[in-house]
Image (cartoon, rainbow, N blue to C red):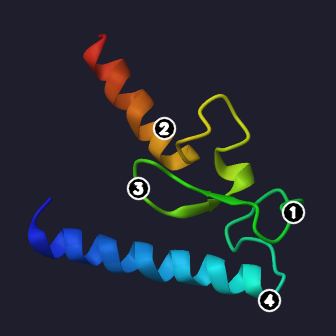
Amino acid sequence: MDENQTTSHDLQCYLHNLDQRIREEKSLPPSDCHCGQCLPGWYFECSRCGHLKAWCLGASDDYPELCDHCWQEVFEMEFQVNE
């Protein structure tokens, strides 16, 4: 990843996380909740991408430190290595 991509990712992550925190302050569920059951503040920080993700997008499964998107990427990389 070059410097411009890193800067773009950092800005995107910052804005996404700011939105999640604002939603929590307004007693709204996380913006990326797909289950409809996450309550305000039910998010976690993915240890790989740094985004604050809704609880239902990863923290509720066997890999609580990774969001579903990052888990999928890691799984695919490991699968390619083991082929």
- Find residue 72 and name its label: 2
Sequence-wise, the earlier of marks 4 and 3 is: 4
What crowding class fits label 1: few (fewer than 14 Cα within 10 Å), some (14-19), or many (20 or more)?
Answer: few
Q: Are marks 1 and 4 in contact (CB under 8 Å)?
A: no
Q: Nearer the viewer, mark 2 or mark 4?
A: 4
- Find residue 26 and name its label: 4
What crowding class fits label 2: few (fewer than 14 Cα within 10 Å), some (14-19), or many (20 or more)?
Answer: few
Tell me the quarter of the picture where residue 22 sits. Answer: bottom right
41 lies left or right of 36: left
60 lies left or right of 14: right
Q: Are marks 2 and 3 in contact (CB under 8 Å)?
A: no
40 lies left or right of 59: right
The residue that label 3 is drawn on is 49
Tell me the quarter of the picture where residue 1 sits. Answer: bottom left
Residue at the limit of the structure toward the top, as seen here: 83
Sequence-wise, the earlier of marks 1 and 4 is: 4
Residue 35 position within the rendered picture, expressed as x and y whole percent measured from the top left: 83, 56
The residue that label 1 is drawn on is 36
**Above or below — where is 10 with respect to 70?**
below
Q: Which secondary structure, mark 1?
A: loop
Q: Which secondary structure, mark 2?
A: helix
Give, as a three-letter code, the residue at label 2.
Gln
Give, as a three-letter code, the residue at label 1.
Gly
Residue drawn 80% across and 73% down? Answer: 29
Residue 12 position within the rendered picture, expressed as x and y whole percent measured from the top left: 39, 77
Q: Which secondary structure, mark 3?
A: loop
Sequence-wise, the earlier of marks 2 and 3 is: 3
Residue drawn 55% across and 41% down? Answer: 65
Sequence-wise, the earlier of marks 1 and 2 is: 1
